[in-house]
Amino acid sequence: MNNAKKSPAKKSHSARRAKPETWDLRLYIAGQTPNSISAIANLRKICEERLQGRYRIEIIDLLEKPQLARGDQIIAIPTLVRKLPAPVKKIIGNLSVAERALVGLDLQPST
Amino acid sequence: MKKVHSANHSRNTFPKAATGIEGLDEITGGGLPKGRTTLVVGSPGCGKTLMTMTFLAHGAMYCGEPGVCIQFEESADKLGANLISLGIDLDDLTRRKKLLVDHVRIERNEIEETGEYDLQGLFIRLGLAVDTIKAKRVVMDGIETLFAGLQDQAILRSELRRLFGWLDDHNLTAIVTGERGDKMLTRHGLEEYIADCVILLDHRVTDQISTRRLRIVKYRGSSHGTDEYPFLIDDDGITLMPVTSLGLTHKASKERVPSGIPALDEMLGGKGFYRGSSILVSGTAGTGKSSIGARFADAGCARGESCLYFAFEESPSQIMRNMASLGVKLDRWVKKGLLTFHAARPASTGLEMHLAVMQKMVAKLSPNIVVLDPLTSIFAAGNSHGAQVMFTRMIDFLKMRGVTSIFTNLTASSGEGHDYAGVSSLMDAWISLELVGGNGSGPARILSVVKSRGMAHARGGRELIVKKGRLDLAPAPEEVR
């Protein structure tokens, strides 16, 4: 929808990202299970490749803090929650299929 | 909700957990299998959630067994308000750590799956909830929503198996609810995992008449009723009709109850009906059936007895007005609390539901006398074999309680007319009314006693006089004798 009445000069300004947004990621695990260990490794790899310098990962072990499972509606383990940028996204599984993980995080358009 | 003590264990060797649902604890010999999982199956709106919450609240309030509910159904969020009227205060129970509800939400559209996972998060939540309040009972309501929320069905199935094993290992008495399926009992075959006890709830609407039924499909290691039991959902929660083999064990009373019409008592061996007997008053339209029923109620109240009057054709005010014109003043008994009317249009629900409501009211009010006017209407609401069985139970139920009951029955034309569901054979006394003749002052209402078990009764007809300020019998006119 072309809106000729509004000043077209602003278009280029909004297209440019003002400042890089920090990604706030939370990974829920339950003890050092093989799935948890590989999820941590896979997540770190993705972040380093795609979000270098602008991400924060918080790992929550529900064996230590079981009361935190309710807040983010955690059922499956491991679950990665993208708190920021909005909207909240959840990816469950050990993130072994990088492509799916990237789609889930909105780092790559769905094909 | 009533406190239900766990029933005797003579036939049932393992312990049971009372549900607090009247009737259900009766037919299961005390409740659900303790320390095991029960599957409750039904279509949406059939009462699953109400049933499970009653089970939890009863445990928490009366059995010293706190309960956890993992609630997957979003529609159950507003349940709390409805439960208040049943005397279940979810908030209060939650504050006192007797009950804990954890709502599980799975937003399919914000979840992506990649790689392996398990449902340890759910286990952790359940485990935490159980530990927090030292729960003995658990409900997993709507767990099948997981099938819509998660893609990997193989993982889900193996995790469900692990979950039910976990419940068993922790010796928790649990209910898992499932949606009714087409090919299988439940949509996702939960019955495959839960083998100890399966209860099916059914809500059928046939010819716009709704009937709720409960059936115990399976109860391993325990005897249980196998029928379909009608149940009610109303202001008191769920009530299953207590129909366990009433049989013919009632004690026949020798006491007599006057009918309120001395001349009729005269026909009945001089003293009236037997207390606790069932009396049928049949006749064509306008023969005075209702008047006899109402007069009987009036006489009972005058003796200080309580009476429950089921009106299925006329409103209570209409009945009271009509009867007042015959000098029978019923309103005073209503004011005194001796007479209770229950008026309903029979077509609104099925016969079984009517009988269920009636049985419940009788249990609640414990009347000495019941008038049902007319029987015809409720049988018109659905006349199946099931209806007949139910009605037989109703009569047995009244007899067990020593209630003297009058049932009026409209017949289409003179003679015996249609004998609905063979009711006349269930009756101890049968009074027939018909219009006879037509010369002079118009047709006469002729009353005769067709049968009256256990007493000598008068043969031949009498004329029933129904006019202003008077309801009485007179010798039958010459031409009809």
Image (cartoon, coloured by chain):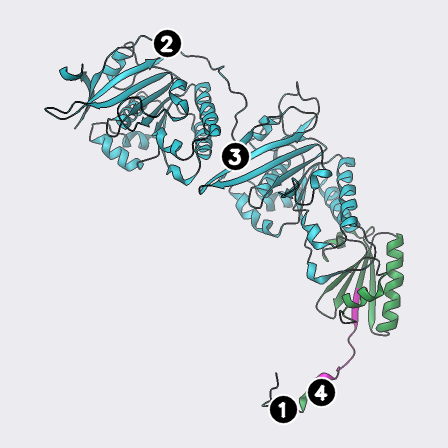
Chain colours: A green, B cyan
Magenta-tinted stretch: A15-25
Which corner quadrant of the image does residue B398 belong to? top left
Marks 4 & 2 on one chain:
no
Measured from the top left, where is residue B470 in percent x and y? 18, 24
State how far apart marks 4 and 2 are (Cα): 103 Å
Q: Which of B340/B39 is in front?
A: B39
Quarter holding the C terminus of chain A is bottom right
Q: Which residue is mark 1?
A: A7
Q: Which residue is mark 3?
A: B231
Marks 3 & 4 on one chain:
no
Q: Which residue is mark 2?
A: B454
Label 3: chain letter: B
Measured from the top left, where is residue B75 in percent x and y? 59, 51
The residue furthest left is B440
Amino acid beneath label 4: His
Q: Which mark is residue A13?
A: 4
Neighbor class of circle 3 (other Cα within 10 Å; few <14, some 14-19, many 20+) is many
Which corner quadrant of the image does residue B31 belong to? top right
Amino acid beneath label 3: Phe
Marks 3 & 1 on one chain:
no
Q: Do callouts 1 and 4 mark residues in contact (Cβ within 8 Å)?
A: no
Q: Which of B451/B330 is in front?
A: B451
Q: Is residue B219 visible?
A: yes
Q: Do callouts 3 and 4 mark residues in contact (Cβ within 8 Å)?
A: no
Identity of the residue drawn at 72% across and 65% down: A88
Label 1: chain letter: A
State how far apart marks 1 and 2 are (Cα): 103 Å
